[in-house]
Amino acid sequence: MDVSASTSVLDQAWSAFADRRKTADRIFRGALIFNTALTLFWAVMLVTGGNAYFFGSYALSLPGLARVFVGVLVFYVLWGFIWYGVKTLLLKYVAGFSEDERREAFSSRMRSPFEVDQFVRRHSERRIRIIDMIGRRGRFITLAMAGFFYLYSRVAADPSSNFATLFLQDNLADAVITSWIFLGFYYSDGLLAAAFYGPQSRVMDGVLARANCLLITTLWTVFKFVLVPLGGRLASIYQPGEFAVVFALIWGSYIVTDASTEVGGALFGKQRLRVWGIGDVNRKSIGGTVSGLVAGLVFCLWIVIGHGLPFPWMLLAVAIAVSNTAFELFSPRGTDDFTMASANALICWAFGTFAR
């Protein structure tokens, strides 16, 4: 390759990087504006003693700060380092990444071009996708499923009117502080940033990997303002004995479908379905979509049949499974957690209001 051709390739790489960096910066600014507004809202509620409608508490106390610190230390730092180590070993021994490539993979990727095509040329794309899946799902699915079964058992044993929001943070101070920590590490290349972002930042998402993670984290907080009023409506139209089923259909089905789609797609799928979203490479697979549909359908029917509910509930189970699959496939990448759970809650509301 002559000098002019080499310069042209380099210019193209920097031009592509600049476009992706702009998108990453927009996601950061959007999250920054939202969390600033949320912080101001929290401060007003704290000073005025406003009604704790969306969040169970606005108070900031030493026990509360200790709870946030322990939560961040255990779930984001210690658990993050465990999966950071697992992913590092897999990238080294399974994908064959060099030390420099691993360091680049766990960096913010926002200092210089991070070309996914170059990694795929040197290493197996399928192995990279599988390792991305293990790091991301290992980091989250173990905690999510443990949390789900604990909360599901709690709702079944002691139904309460806030059953629909149990998976969301109940103290606004917790949400604000955690969001500021994620914003603070967004551009960092340090070891703590690698623990926070590394396991769930896909290699295949390139420069936009952390933007994808930050978008998911921000929408998770936004979801509180959607599900709290809707959760109140659900509590008024269902019987306490049905709360556990509705909780499982909203949260459990979404967790199972989302995880099974990525696991099935990484192991068996061929990434041929082009989708839009936050990532350098936005493709999904028929294999992953089918895996998510089957797993979600089995889960939903298992919950309904296990509780001995009549046939209309089976139709609800099918509708939830199909909705989860559709929103997982067609939602812009980085937003499907929000759209899937929101759609599940709305479908349950419509069923309880009109179809029973």
Image (tube, rainbow, N blue to C red):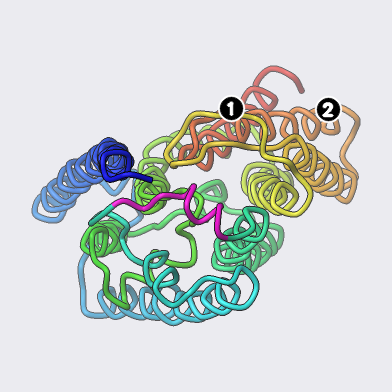
Which residue is painted at 55% across and 61% down in the image?
Answer: 136
Asked whether 114 falls inside the magenta stretch, the response is yes
Tell me if 10 is positioned left or right of 134 in this view. left
Residue 315's tag is 2
Which residue is painted at 55% across and 53% down in the image?
Answer: 120
Tell me if 218 is positioned left or right of 81 in this view. left
Visible in this render: residue 282? yes
Look at discs 1 and 2 and give the one toward the viewer.
1
Tell me if 248 is positioned left or right of 114 in this view. right
Q: Position of residue 48 (x, y in %)?
A: 10, 50
Eyeballing the image, is 243 above or below 16? Answer: below
* Circle 2 crowding by C-alpha within 10 Å: few under 14, some 14–19, many from 20: some
Disc 1 marks which residue? 330
Eyeballing the image, is 233 above or below 244? Answer: above
Q: Secondary structure at mark 2?
A: helix
Residue 299's tag is none
Q: Quadrant of the N terminus?
A: top left
Cα separation between marks 1 and 2: 22 Å
Three-letter residue code for mark 2: Leu
Give, as a single range, the part of the protein colored magenta: 113-122
Q: Of the residues under marks 1 and 2, which one precedes in the sequence?
A: 2
Q: Position of residue 330 (x, y in %)?
A: 58, 27
Q: Secondary structure at mark 1?
A: helix
Which residue is painted at 40% across and 57% down in the image?
Answer: 169
